[in-house]
Amino acid sequence: MRIESRLFGLGAFFFIPVAIVYGWLTHWSEWVGIMGIFLLGGLAAMIGSYLSVTARRVGARPEDREDAEVHEGAGEQGHFSPWSWWPIVLGASAATALLGVAIGWWITLVGAGIGIVALVGWVFEYSRGDHAH
């Protein structure tokens, strides 16, 4: 994960000066772009620091070593739900909530309500029904 943390860390050192140059070129009159680029630099810094801490905790992965073989990365990569419909419902609710910001605030409330239901359904998917553990 060291290469990923370096890439995101360099992204922070790139986007912050770009935001300053962008602000200077627009005479500090276009605040949405300036703040967007500053926030992008902050996001890159947060992700880079998280990956750096995780790389120290986990250690070197096969992807990080030059002499690694392909079979070293084999095995279980995590638990995924290929039959779950909740991510689609959660994505649709996020799209509805963002549509509400553009059209009307009442649509945002509808999207947020559907999002809460979808998030609870996704979290408790394995606590009830056919796939309960």
Image (cartoon, rainbow, N blue to C red):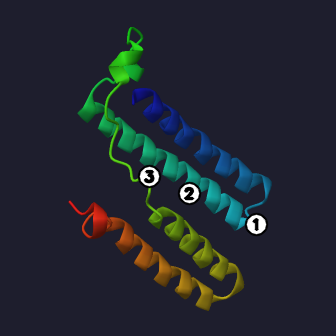
* Above or below 130: residue 120: below
Q: Residues within 10 Å of mark 3 (few under 14, many from 20)?
A: few
Measured as percent of width and height from the top left, residue 46 is found at 43, 49
* Above or below 130: residue 57: above
Measured as percent of width and height from the top left, residue 23 is found at 71, 56
Position of the C terminus by quadrant: bottom left
Q: Secondary structure at mark 3?
A: loop
| Of the image marks 3 and 1, the number of the one nearer the N terminus | 1
Measured as percent of width and height from the top left, residue 60 is found at 31, 23
Q: Residue at x 58, y 78 (%)?
A: 97
Q: Which residue is mark 3?
A: 82
Could you say which is closer to the camera, residue 13 or residue 127?
127
| Of the image marks 2 and 3, the number of the one nearer the N terminus | 2
Q: Name the disc covering residue 29, or none.
A: 1
The label nearer to you, 2 versus 3, is: 3
The label nearer to you, 2 versus 1, is: 2
Q: Name the disc covering residue 123, or none.
A: none
Q: Which residue is mark 2?
A: 39
What amino acid does circle 1 point to?
A: Ser
Q: Residue at x 67, y 88 (%)?
A: 104
Could you say which is closer to the camera, residue 30 or residue 87?
87
Q: Residue at x 60, y 39 (%)?
A: 14
Q: Residue furthest bottom?
A: 106
Could you say which is closer to the camera, residue 80 or residue 11?
80
Discs 3, 1 touching: Cβ within 8 Å: no
Within the image, what quadrant is residue 2 found in? top left
In this picture, residue 99 sits left or right of residue 87 = right
Q: Residues within 10 Å of mark 2 (few under 14, many from 20)?
A: some
What amino acid does circle 3 point to?
A: Pro
Q: Residue at x 53, y 87 (%)?
A: 109
Q: Secondary structure at mark 1?
A: loop
